[in-house]
Image (cartoon, grey):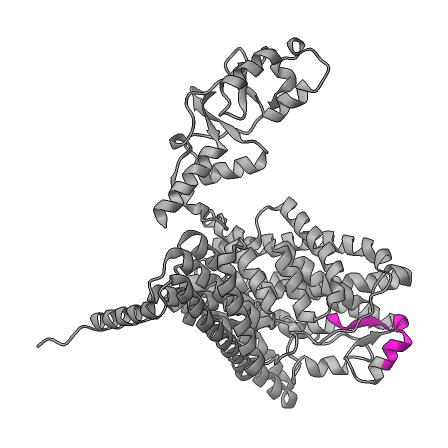
Amino acid sequence: MEPPRKDNVFSRAQNWIVSSLRQWFTHEVTLTIFLAILIGIAGGLGSVVFTHLIHAVSYVSVDAILAWSDDKPPAFYLLLFTPILGLLIVSWLTLRFAPEAQGHGVPEVIAAVARRDGLIRPRVAFVKILASGICIGTGGSVGREGPIVQIGAALGSISGQFLKLSARNMKVLVASGSAAGISATFNAPLAGVMFASEIVLGNFAVESLTPIVIASVLAAVVQSEIGEHGFNPAFTQLYHQFEGAWAQLPSYLILGVVCGLIAVSFTKLVYYTEDLALKNVSRWWQRAVLAGFIVGLAGILYPPVPPAPSNYSNYRQEAGEHREPPLFGVGYEVVDHALHLEFSEKTSSIRDHELEAGQEKVVQLSEPQMISTFWWLLPLALLKPLLTSITLGGGGSGGIFAPSLYIGATTGACFGLLLNLYLPEQFSAHPGVYAIVGMGAVVAGTTHGIMSAIIIVYEMTSDYRIILPIMVSAGLASLVARFVDPESIYDKKLSRRGETVARGLDMHHLEHVMVRDVMIRNFPTVLNTDNLTQIIQVAQKNSHIESIPVMNVEKQLIGIIRPEDLHRMLDTDIPPHLLNADDIALASPISVSPDENLLEAIRDFGTRDVDSLPVERIINGQRQLVGVLLRSEVMLRYRQEMLRHY
């Protein structure tokens, strides 16, 4: 008798587990909440394992070389080769087993939710944790937050696929895994919820919040019990004084603009470097070697501590027993150092008492030390985005969230040092305060997640007084970044691959519906010479069409007339017969093509505040009006598509 096939055994076991669980949990919602509990615990454990893996890889590579160099100084230059070896291993691993595990991870999670109903291949979790652990541990200048988000999301997707959940609940579980990853990494459960809702799902629907909150809280509890932070915030609690808030407000506004521009530059640099590498270096191993060499060279050449005569012995010890290069890995030692900078001349007697009591590890600086610290931090702020881009362009695997924090902290600290050197005391806070605010501002500028940035920085520093400055700078940084480039660093990666993502309401189903399938073909028009009385008659006969196209004598579209335009003209004292369509119409209206999909058309609706759009086709080189697209018809079709898929 032929033995049973393995896939049949697995399928039977899966069916038995699914049927058993569905007997216990009669509603899929309750089953989703139960799975969120498991995902939260697994996400917390995964974060701890991932962190230990990074430390283990770093210990046998970077730390071992640094320890050897204490006895034999020339051994220090072997650090040049650790990023090369790491990128070679990571590039081979991801290309061989899971290409989607390459890069920073979060865009793949967003795409899985927005376009693939939450489906992520099971192997991604295992390849990502290994690849990113090796990349960061060997000195790759990337972060660990993106990987742990993708790992948590993959765990959520795996559980949903195994238990054959609906697409809607699959997406919730993926978001729950993402929340668990952020929560465990930063010991910040509220930030995990906000990140999953704002950036991954793109909405705050009540039905999805409960599993996300549960997973996020449990991940933080697991991390607190067995992780490296315990119940403490990710960064040592700060005790900076916040005085003269109104006088300092202009400085926070300026910092927000600066960080917004830096965030956009970082986003563009990441993908410019990637394009440059793919265009000029054809083989993957050559890209890995070149990128690793540049990262390693920066690591061994840059001084591990500021060239100041005093006050840095603590930092030397906190940066690692053997002073890991400040541009290697995540770089949180540099961030933590920047957050604690203070100008000694501003320190009050209360501050002195706190320092004597040993309540914190503030680095107080004299004016000469501030200058030397500025010139040590400024190159770090400029080099970190470059090295992160090079690491990712060379095939590395790691996140951009930690580099954004690093860039923000160093930029903010430099900004604060300059203000303390050249402005009166009442117009500037301590440099460490600007470092905290800079972190939130750059994160908001790169991710376009303002609330996530504000809350995550608050939870990492555990100081509520910093909320208002962060809100000012992060909001302005996001506004500036969106003005320069509407796409976040996550969305840009997807758009470069031709993947249009509309988060929040499953809008991707509208990609397959064309404008020509929904547009109104029989529609009214008015001539640009028609007066207001004639236009009102046309509008009354066609009340279902909100905006009426305005044509010239050559039958070309020159504008549209909206209801508010008519109401505005009726409120004037000008007789209706003296007003014609030219005086009323909204000129140069946005039109859509009948061959566009409805997802593209929705963006056009958002560009102009209108309820209908003219549809034009180019015929014999001339634009010709062929229909009108109504917002109400688009939403009706959206509801139909939702019912069809769910």
Query: What is the count of numbered marks?
Result: 0
Q: Nearer the viewer, residue 254 or 7?
A: 7
Which residue is the extreme one toward the bottom? 71
Q: With 357 as the anchor, is 176 left or right in this view?
A: left
Residue at 46 percent across and 20 percent down: it is 523
* 630 is higher (above) or lower (below) than 490: above
Q: Nearer the viewer, residue 429 or 113?
A: 113
Q: With 449 as the anchor, is 601 left or right in this view?
A: left
* 309 is higher (above) or lower (below) than 153: below
> In the image, which residues are magenta?
339-353
Which residue is the extreme one toward the left? 1
Q: Position of residue 558 (x, y in %)?
A: 56, 20
* 603 is higher (above) or lower (below) than 618: below
Q: With 151 as the anchor, is 574 left or right in this view?
A: right
Q: With 130 as the anchor, is 373 left or right in this view?
A: right
User: Which quadrant of the rendered structure holds the N terminus?
Assistant: bottom left
Residue at 59 percent across and 25 percent down: it is 563
Q: Position of residue 466 (x, y in %)?
A: 75, 64
Q: Position of residue 39 (x, y in %)?
A: 45, 71
Is 342 within the magenta? Answer: yes
Residue at 48 percent across and 66 percent down: it is 177
| Residue 140 shows in the view | no
Is 185 within the magenta? Answer: no
Q: Position of residue 359 (x, y in %)?
A: 78, 82
* Residue 325 location, quadrant: bottom right
